[in-house]
Image (spheres, rainbow, N blue to C red):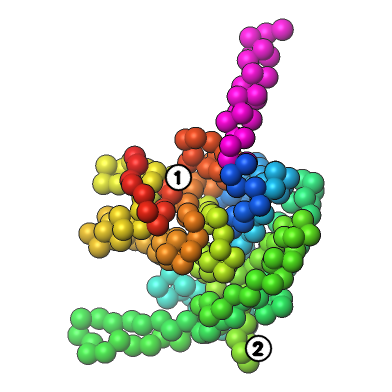
C-alpha cells in the first residue's frame, strides 16, 4: 500500500470528525443558496453543486436553491435575433423578452438543475415564484439623474421587478417532505403580470421569509476584498455599513453585499459571499473550521 493510499483514509476520517459539530449544529436548519455564475456553467462545478445539495439534505439540513440564468437568457435572445439592452446593469424586459426569460429560467435552467440533483440521489422540485404565488412582485422603478437635472428621471425597463412579499407555505411543505426546492426568480404582481427579478434579491428575501440559518451567495470572486486585496472573512453588519460609507465596498460587489446585509438585518443568522468557482464551496463554508469567502453577522468582528 502506498503512502497516498494510507493517508487518504485518515484524512477522510479527520474531515468527517471536523464536520460533526457543524452537522449537529445545523441539523434541522434552512440554508438558502443562490446558484449562478461559473458554478452553473462548468461541468465539474455543476456536478459538485448537485452532490453538495444532496449531502446537506442527507445530514438533516434543508437546502433551498434560488438560481440565476442571465447568460442563458442572453444566448437564447441572440438566437432569436432579439436585442439585449441594459440599464444600470439590468436587462430591459419587454413582453417578448419576458416570454424568453420565463422559458429559460422556469424551463431550461430550472429543470436542468432539478435533474442534476435528482441524478445525484436527491429529490428536487422545480418552481418559479408564480407557483402558489410564492413571490409577489411589483415593477422596479429605475431612477436616472445627472448633475444638471433638477429631478431624477424614471426609466421604464419593463417586466423587471422587485420582491413585495414571499409566501413560504409551499417551500416549507416540500422541505418537510424531504424535497429540495429549486426556485426560478420570476415573480407575479396582483394583476398576474410576470416579472424578472435579480436572483440575489430573491434569495435574500426567501431567506428572510424562512428565517434561514444561512444565506449563501455563490459568486465569481473569492469574497469581499479589503484595501490590500485580501479576503475579509468575517464582518458585522455595522462594519459592512462603515465599509459601504467609506467606499471600500463599491462597484459590482455593492448590490450583492447590500442584499446579504439586508437579509441579516431581516433575521437571517448569517450571510456568506463565497467563491462558486471552488468545487464544494458550500460544504467548505458550512462544515470546516476555516470556511471560505466572507461571512456577515448581525454582531461579530472582522477577520482577515
* 67 shown above or below 235: below
In the rendered image, which quarter contains the N terminus? Answer: top right
Instruction: Describe the element under mark 2 as helix, strand or loop.
Output: loop
* 293 shown above or below 199: above
Span of residues in magenta? 1-23
- Give the quadrant of residue 287: top right
> Does the magenta portion include 8?
yes
Would residue 139 be visible to someone looking at this image?
yes
| 108, 206: nearer the viewer | 206
What is the x, y in percent for residue 6? Answer: 67, 12
| 5, 285: nearer the viewer | 285
Residue extending furthest bottom? Answer: 191
What is the x, y in percent for residue 151? Answer: 26, 89
| Label at residue 293 | 1
**Residue at the image point whose x is 67% and y is 8% from the top:** 2
Q: Which residue is mark 2?
A: 192
Amino acid at each position: 500500500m502506498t503512502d497516498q493510499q494510507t493517508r487518504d483514509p485518515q484524512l477522510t476520517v479527520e474531515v468527517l470528525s471536523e464536520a460533526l459539530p457543524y452537522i449537529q449544529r445545523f441539523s434541522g436548519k434552512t440554508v438558502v443558496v443562490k446558484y449562478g455564475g461559473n458554478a452553473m456553467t462548468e461541468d465539474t462545478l455543476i456536478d459538485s453543486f448537485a452532490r453538495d445539495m444532496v449531502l446537506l439534505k442527507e445530514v438533516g439540513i434543508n437546502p433551498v436553491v434560488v438560481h440565476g440564468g442571465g447568460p442563458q437568457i442572453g444566448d437564447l435572445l441572440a438566437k432569436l435575433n432579439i436585442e439585449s439592452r441594459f440599464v444600470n446593469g439590468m436587462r430591459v424586459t419587454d413582453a417578448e423578452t419576458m416570454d424568453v426569460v420565463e422559458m429559460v429560467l422556469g424551463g431550461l435552467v430550472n429543470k436542468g438543475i432539478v435533474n442534476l440533483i435528482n441524478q445525484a440521489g436527491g429529490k428536487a422540485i422545480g418552481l418559479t415564484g408564480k407557483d402558489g404565488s410564492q413571490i409577489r412582485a411589483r415593477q422596479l422603478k429605475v431612477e436616472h439623474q445627472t448633475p444638471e437635472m433638477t429631478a431624477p428621471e424614471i426609466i421604464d425597463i419593463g417586466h423587471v421587478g422587485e420582491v413585495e412579499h414571499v409566501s413560504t407555505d409551499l417551500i416549507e411543505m416540500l422541505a418537510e417532505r424531504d424535497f429540495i426546492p429549486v426556485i426560478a426568480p420570476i415573480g407575479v404582481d396582483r394583476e398576474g403580470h410576470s416579472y424578472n427579478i435579480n436572483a440575489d434579491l430573491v434569495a435574500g428575501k426567501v431567506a428572510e421569509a424562512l428565517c434561514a440559518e444561512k444565506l449563501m451567495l455563490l459568486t465569481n470572486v473569492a469574497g469581499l476584498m479589503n484595501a490590500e486585496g485580501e479576503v475579509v472573512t468575517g464582518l458585522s453588519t455595522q462594519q459592512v455599513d462603515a465599509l459601504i460609507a467609506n467606499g471600500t465596498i463599491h462597484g459590482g460587489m455593492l448590490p450583492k453585499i447590500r442584499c446579504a446585509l439586508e437579509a441579516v438585518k431581516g433575521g437571517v443568522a448569517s450571510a456568506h459571499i463565497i467563491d462558486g468557482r471552488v468545487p464544494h464551496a458550500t460544504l467548505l463554508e458550512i462544515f470546516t473550521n476555516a470556511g471560505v469567502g466572507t461571512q456577515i453577522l448581525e454582531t461579530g468582528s472582522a477577520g482577515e
